Amino acid sequence: MTGLPLFNYPAFNEAAAHLRALGHTPLNPARHDIAGPIKPWDYYMRDALSLVIQADGIALLSGWEDSRGAVLEHILGDALGMDIRPLEGWLS
């Protein structure tokens, strides 16, 4: 999310909408208000990791490998034995 336009919130919100339409209950890290003051990276990362431990699986957006945060989420999800797939794998 860091360094991307609008922190890539539009892509996260679109993915969440698709997953919701298929009956999933997405835990979307892009639920924060980005209009106000931006908090430090670790604030958002701690929140995102708390969502990971609540989830049953992880849907990875395109380019996740280039995201320090997504890599951490993947490592944690893998350690917890979660179902981790690219977003497209959840949509079929």
Image: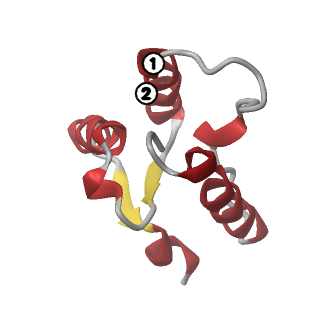
Q: Which residue is nearer to you in this view: 63 or 54?
A: 63
Q: Looking at the rendered structure, which numbered label has been put on residue 77?
A: none
Residue 26: x and y in percent read 65, 50
Instruction: State the residue at coordinates (34%, 38%).
Output: 73
Residue 69 percent location from the top left of the image: 35, 37
- Dividing the picture into quadrants, the one containing residue 27 is top right
Q: Toward which corner of the image does residue 62 lie, by quadrant?
A: bottom left
Callout 2: SS: helix
Horizontally, residue 27 falls left or right of residue 69, namely right
Residue kind at label 1, given as amino acid type: Arg
- Name the residue carrying label 2: 49
* Residue 89 sits above or below residue 67 on the image: below
Please state which amino acid type lies under the numbered disc 2: Leu
Q: Quadrant of residue 89?
A: bottom left
Quick check: marks 1 and 2 in contact, CB under 8 Å?
yes
Tag 1 residue: 46
- The answer to which of 16 and 10 lies nearer the viewer is 10
At a point 49% along the width and 30% down the height, the residue shown is 48
Say which element carries label 1.
helix
Q: Is residue 47 left or right of residue 37?
A: left
For the point 75% across and 63% down, which residue is it?
17
Q: Position of residue 51 (x, y in %)?
A: 53, 31
Please state the horizontal and vertical placement of residue 55, each as a whole percent of the image: 51, 40
Disc 1 crowd rating (10 Å Cα; few below 14, some 14-19, many 20+) is few
What is the total number of numbered labels drawn onto the structure image?
A: 2
* Image position of 92 with respect to 5: above or below: below
